Image (tube, rainbow, N blue to C red):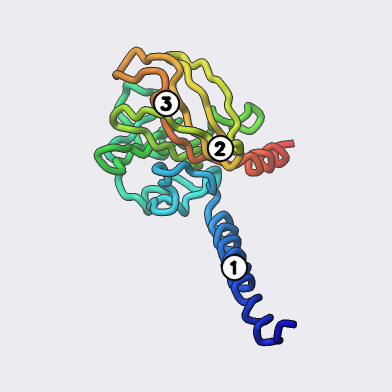
Amino acid sequence: MLSSSKMVSGWRPLRVQFALMLMVQMGVAQTRASTPYPNELPGYRFYRSAKWRTLVPLVATIEKVRLMLGPPVEATDLAAYFKPYPSDSEAKQPLLTYRLNRDWQTLLYFGPSCSSLPKPSQGIGKGRLCSIEIVPSRRRSFRSVSFPAVYRKEHVNGVDAGWDEYSDGSGLVYEVYTTRTPYGDEVPGDLNRIVYGPSTEQVERLLKSKK
């Protein structure tokens, strides 16, 4: 018969292993709770270190964006694309562009309407943040990228190109070209952009508020 001391020592490795597993699970849970975009792909995790990470789509204003990020490298009114940018207060559909680094640009789209949302919820108020979108400055192939099962794939036919959208419901979307574009050198399988937008839950709340 084993002595009680031997039985305790025999159980100790199992207790340690269980404790380590619990710590790992708690760490994963804390990570998911600390970010609204828990399913970023390896190598493309911009949110946690981004200067804009506290900006909440549908909530943040263009004034807050400028206060946090400073002047953009370019400002455009999408409603008058080829005209000089008037001002934030006069622009009907503002787009502010910031350069993340030499490989990526950060585009911030603002209301009063967000074309990416379902039609009943597109109106969010003038100067409210629609989405933050990370666009590569050069070709970035996604042919070998494998999306986890949490992502849903939907095909989009745009005016100038087609692409597949991979979304997980958090507001995170990866757009991957399925056709060539009439500009640039992108080919099918290249990344178009990464979108950090409102979650499905946020959009549903917005829809309810409009009823």
Dot 1, how many residues are within 10 Å of its Cα: few (below 14), some (14-19), or many (20+)?
A: few
Which residue, given by chain and number where applicable, does mark 3 sit on? 143
Q: Which comes sooner in the sequence, label 1 or label 2? A: 1
The residue that appears at 58% across and 35% down in the rendered structure is 151
Q: Is residue 52 above or below residue 16?
A: above
Task: Identify the residue shown where x is 63% and y is 67%.
Answer: 18
**Residue bearing the label numbered 2:** 148
Name the kind of residue labelled 2 in the image: Pro
Locate the C terminus by quadrant. top right
Distance from label 1 to label 3 (Cα)? 38 Å
Q: Nearer the viewer, residue 184 or 112?
A: 184
Q: How much space separates mark 1 and mark 2, taking CA atoms?
A: 28 Å
> Which amino acid does the dot numbered 1 rest on?
Gln
Gap in Å between the C-alphas at discs 2 and 3?
A: 14 Å
Mark 3 crowdedness (10 Å alpha carbons): few <14, some 14-19, many ≥20: few
Which is more toward the observer, 175 or 85?
A: 175
Quarter holding residue 191: top left
Circle 2 packing at 10 Å, graded few (<14), some (14-19), many (20+), is few
Please, what secondary structure does the residue beneath circle 1 have?
helix
Q: Earlier in the sequence, mark 2 or mark 3?
A: 3
In the image, is 171 to the left or to the right of 77?
A: right
Residue farthest toward the front in the current orientation of the protein: 1
